[in-house]
Amino acid sequence: MDRRLLRRLKKAGRETRVWSRNGMRILVLKDGGRLLGLYAPDSKENFFWVNPRIYGDAQSVWKAKWPNPGGDRCWLSPACGIHLDQNGDHARYQIPERIDPGYHDMERWKGGMMRLCNVGKIFLRKAGKKDTFALERYVSWAENPLCHMEEDWVGRLFYAGYSQKTRLESLSCNRNNLSIWNILQVPTGGEVFIPAYNGKSIPRACLGMNSRNLVRIEDAGIILRADGKKNCMISIPPQMSTGRIGYVRQAGKEWTLVVRSFHVNPSGEYLNCMIGASGKPGYAVQCRIVSDGDASHVELHHHVPVNSSQVIYDTCQTWCFRGNQKNIHCAAACLTGYESVPSNRRCHREGGL
């Protein structure tokens, strides 16, 4: 555990809890209901991205127009209906305070589970009225998905992971207004791999993908180089998504792998779409690279479709590994189909279908 980070957060007046099991640890930040850190046994290295400005002047992070300390967070979608102003002005993209940081209750339940709950009221621009929502997240530990494999390299990896069940209830409006939007932030310097059916098919929508060295289209999916030098985003429709997204990165002498596994409904109605494309079919998976100097980072998004009721559920798991390059690549290939050596160097052009 990063004791320096805990001291800086305490000095800034931020309430945190450390939750541990079998050497694995999760750092929970009440402000924003974020899982700010995940640590493998006998390791002080965080799998997630934490805003480095916290180590300097932590208060400055929360004094910003939108505070982003890092970690794993849960938002509401669609972005076009919640975060843009009345006239759809892209320059005025704002996150409502009720969503982030919100007003989270945090409690530890018996049986190895933690509950985070955010209740608030926001204005829905498309519906033209306010809606009261209740967003609950239940976090529990997840067993190593490789634990039953017999290969020798499995035992040479350090692991930490958790399951997350999310419940969103719209208390004053019907369906088609709100949905769940999960965002996991990791450091730059690695490669994002989005497994996809018919990986050679061009992704539906991209922003800032005009570099020939930024994206590779492989048979099994899409590889995005995340160097943090340029703002960009890629979006995958539910019909192409396999329900997983992975991130491989070298961290000093070690390598890390972060995998998020989630449910996808190809027949479902996904609300979130690219800004300016309101009304078009939405996306199940998005990856965003944020270029912001020392605060550059990578975001792994997955969305949840709406249904015919006022309550929406989501279940996902996050698996993280640390080890040498060979073993991490074996784990990545097993869990996502990722290949470190490209078999096809088709690159994506600017724009989309």
Image (spheres, rainbow, N blue to C red):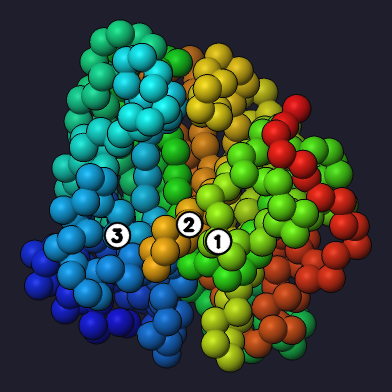
Q: Nearer the viewer, residue 350 or 240?
A: 350
Q: In this figure, what is the number of numbered marks?
A: 3
Asked if 66 appears above or below 89 in the picture, the reply is below
Distance (Cα) linking label 1 and label 3: 20 Å
Q: Quick check: 227 left or right of 16?
A: right
**Residue at 9% of width from left, 72% of height from top?**
11
Image location (x, y in percent) of residue 149: 72, 75
- Residue type at mark 3: give it: Pro
Find numbered disc 2 in the image and state the secondary structure of the residue it sits on: loop
Q: Is any atom of residue 223 visible in this view?
A: no
Quarter of the figure with residue 191: bottom right
- Residue type at mark 2: give it: Ser
Q: Is any atom of residue 12 visible in this view?
A: yes
- Residue type at mark 1: give it: Lys
Find numbered disc 3 in the image and state the secondary structure of the residue it sits on: loop
Distance (Cα) linking label 2 and label 3: 15 Å
**Are there few (<14), some (14-19), or many (20+) residues within 10 Å of tag 2?**
some
Q: Which residue is the site of mark 2?
A: 291
Q: Which residue is the site of mark 1?
A: 229
Q: Earlier in the sequence, mark 2 or mark 1?
A: 1
Q: Quick check: 222 left or right of 297?
A: right
Foreground: disc 1 or disc 3 = 1
Asked if 188 appears above or below 104 in the picture, the reply is below
Q: Earlier in the sequence, mark 1 or mark 3?
A: 3
